């Protein structure tokens, strides 16, 4: 692994890291189904760009493949599936939220602050990307969790899950320059299957005539 | 000395004479997007000329505040034009008269007089407009202050001529904090200038107006001064965004030949502004005006961007010093 990383790489990654955060904020600040999907699609594009940049500067050629696969699976397949489902949903936006998007954004920014102050103690110093990229991925995970716990639309839950996964993915790049190709392949395939299953589930729930509000999906019946 | 005085006057004249071009350009470009022919880019000049030659009708209940307000609205952007780098990259004699905080206060003095003049005649729409614009203003203010604090944190100065030099040096040019600040300021400018997600400048429906309902009682010369002042305010705000915060390239350097440097400075300023105006046209053609009660969300997003700028600046700098 090369030790000398040019300054331009560090700056480029900082900019991309902030873009990654911004897309998470975009998911946080919306109430519409399309907003969630677009934010996720953009986030995956930024993620693929980060993987490409890291691949170029560390000469880790597996990462190019991973970037391509991210683009193909996340921005391509998963976004298309989510769009196809969203088009048929009668509920195009969040029902009344307990936390308005404006307050959510403030909470998300304090979560980011938390991640930025907590992550330097987590990671061993000396890794090339070091703390800020890791802090970005930790805050993505936290924002994803927050999205999962406060949003009521079923599709928002899926996007929250995907944001957490994106956070973990970028964390893997930040600490270990990406996981082995075979592991990434497995994870991407897992997510794809999960999204397909969740999309089917949403379609079925929708066909049953039940609202897609997760608060009303509590009772389990055989 | 004579040269400096000439430049100082030229800066003010630039703001005075070029400001009406921006609304004219935006209106024309929007018309083209909507596949209409649209008015000429120079239409605001014709409008102001016509209005300046008309008498004005003043309510008999209006006091002196109503008469004096257009003058304040008209003059305050011109004073701020002396403090900021419109054409030159080096400070002119009056540049140290006040810093960016002073500029903000002077601009809001104009806004204050517009608001109380709207209340002065006691018309319902004027009162509504000024109360709404105060709400927007009070939401925009923390964002502006946070932006200013981060700028001071980065540049260790509040004089615009120092700030723009520092921000384009290598460690800060591609620092994400810098561009987040620019984005936050752009959103604040949209709100302050009454552009689309916050207010629809071309609306003719009084109940939904914010900015234009404050000038609804004015006519003739007063209206011309009010609208011209508004255009200059927009011009000054864009100059701060472009020449102080983001891309201060093309400004006339010190000890340069005026005949070459000034046209370049003027041309580059206009080019940059037209690009931003095109961006505004795109926004106004694709986004609908938001409900009034969603404006806190819009400015909240700007606040988040500024906070994020603060976090990233603090951490990237600390990180660089540590390694």
Image (cartoon, rainbow, N blue to C red):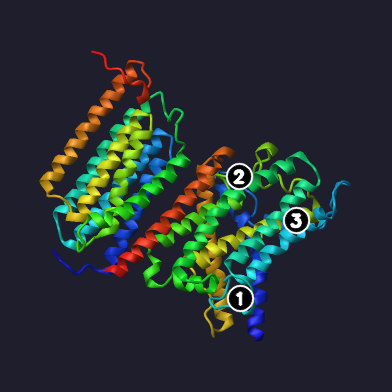
What chain does badge 1 belong to? B
Question: In the image, residue A33 lies at what x, y percent?
Answer: 39, 33
Report the quarter where the N terminus of chain B lies. bottom right
* Circle 2: element type: loop
Q: Residues within 10 Å of mark 3 (few under 14, many from 20)?
A: many
Question: In the image, residue A1 lies at what x, y percent?
Answer: 13, 63
Mark 2 and mark 3 residues within 8 Å of each other at the beta carbon: no
* Circle 1: element type: helix
What chain does badge 3 belong to? B
* Circle 3: element type: helix
Mark 1 and mark 2 residues within 8 Å of each other at the beta carbon: no
Tell me which residue sits at (35%, 66%) in the image.
Answer: B317
Q: Earlier in the sequence, mark 1 or mark 2?
A: 1
Question: In the image, residue B97 lies at what x, y percent?
Answer: 64, 74
Q: CA distance from mark 1 to mark 2?
A: 34 Å
Q: Nearer the viewer, residue B316 or B276?
A: B316
Q: CA distance from mark 2 to mark 3?
A: 20 Å
Q: Earlier in the sequence, mark 2 or mark 3?
A: 2
Same chain, labels 1 and 2: yes
Left-right relation of B310 to B27: left
Left-right relation of B241 to A164: right
Disc 1 target residue: B96
Left-right relation of A58 to A208: left
A50 vs B103: above or below: above
A86 vs A68: above or below: above
Question: In the image, residue B196 lies at what x, y percent?
Answer: 57, 45
**Residue B201 in view (yes/no):** no
Disc 3 target residue: B224
Same chain, labels 1 and 3: yes
Q: Earlier in the sequence, mark 1 or mark 3?
A: 1
Disc 2 target residue: B199
Q: Where, by quadrant of the figure, is residue B315 drawn?
A: bottom left
């Amino acid at each position: 692994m090369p030790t000398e990383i040019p300054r331009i790489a560090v700056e480029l990654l900082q900019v991309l890291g902030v873009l990654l955060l911004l897309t998470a904020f975009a998911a946080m600040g919306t109430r519409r189904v399309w907003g969630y999907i677009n934010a996720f699609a953009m986030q995956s594009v930024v993620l693929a760009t980060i993987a490409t940049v890291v691949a170029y500067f560390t000469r880790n050629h597996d990462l190019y493949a991973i970037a391509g696969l991210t683009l193909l699976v996340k921005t391509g397949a998963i976004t298309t599936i989510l769009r196809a489902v969203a088009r048929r949903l009668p509920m195009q936006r969040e029902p009344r939220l307990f936390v308005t998007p404006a307050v959510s954004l403030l909470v998300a920014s304090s979560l980011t602050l938390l991640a930025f102050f907590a992550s330097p103690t987590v990671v061993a110093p000396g890794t090339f990307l070091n703390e800020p990229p890791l802090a970005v991925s930790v805050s993505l995970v936290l924002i994803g969790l927050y999205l999962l716990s406060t949003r009521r639309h079923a599709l928002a839950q899926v996007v929250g899950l995907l944001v957490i996964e994106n956070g973990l993915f970028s964390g893997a790049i930040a600490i270990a320059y990406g996981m082995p190709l075979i592991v990434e392949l497995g994870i991407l395939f897992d997510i794809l299957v999960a999204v397909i299953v969740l999309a089917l589930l949403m379609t079925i729930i929708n066909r049953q005539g039940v609202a897609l509000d997760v608060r009303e999906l509590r009772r389990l019946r055989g | 000395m004579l040269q400096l005085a000439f430049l100082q006057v030229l800066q003010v004249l630039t703001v005075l004479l070029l400001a009406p071009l921006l609304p004219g350009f935006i209106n024309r470009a929007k018309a083209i997007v909507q596949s209409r022919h649209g008015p000429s880019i120079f239409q605001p000049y014709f409008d102001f000329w016509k209005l300046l030659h008309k008498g004005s009708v003043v309510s008999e209940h209006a006091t002196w505040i109503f008469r004096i307000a257009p003058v304040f609205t008209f003059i305050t952007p011109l004073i701020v034009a002396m403090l900021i780098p419109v054409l030159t990259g080096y400070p002119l004699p009056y540049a140290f008269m006040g810093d960016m905080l002073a500029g903000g206060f002077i601009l809001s003095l104009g806004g204050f007089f517009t608001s109380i003049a709207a209340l002065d005649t006691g018309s319902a729409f004027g009162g509504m407009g000024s109360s709404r614009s105060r709400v927007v203003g009070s939401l925009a203010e923390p964002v502006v202050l946070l932006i200013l604090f981060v700028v001071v944190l980065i540049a260790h100065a509040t004089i615009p001529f120092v700030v723009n030099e520092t921000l384009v040096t290598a460690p800060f040019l591609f620092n994400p904090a810098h561009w987040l600040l620019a984005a936050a300021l752009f959103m604040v400018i949209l709100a302050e200038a009454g552009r689309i997600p916050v207010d629809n400048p071309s609306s003719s429906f009084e109940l939904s107006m914010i900015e234009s309902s404050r000038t609804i009682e004015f006519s003739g010369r007063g209206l011309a001064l009010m609208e011209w002042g508004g255009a200059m305010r927009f011009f000054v705000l864009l100059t701060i965004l472009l020449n102080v915060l983001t891309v201060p390239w093309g400004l006339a350097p010190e000890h340069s030949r005026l005949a070459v440097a000034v046209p370049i400075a003027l041309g580059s300023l206009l080019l940059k502004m037209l690009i931003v105006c095109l961006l505004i046209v795109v926004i106004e053609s694709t986004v609908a005006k938001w409900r009034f009660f969603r404006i806190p969300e819009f400015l909240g997003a700007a606040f988040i961007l500024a906070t994020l700028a603060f976090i990233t600046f603090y951490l990237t700098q600390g990180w660089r010093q540590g390694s």
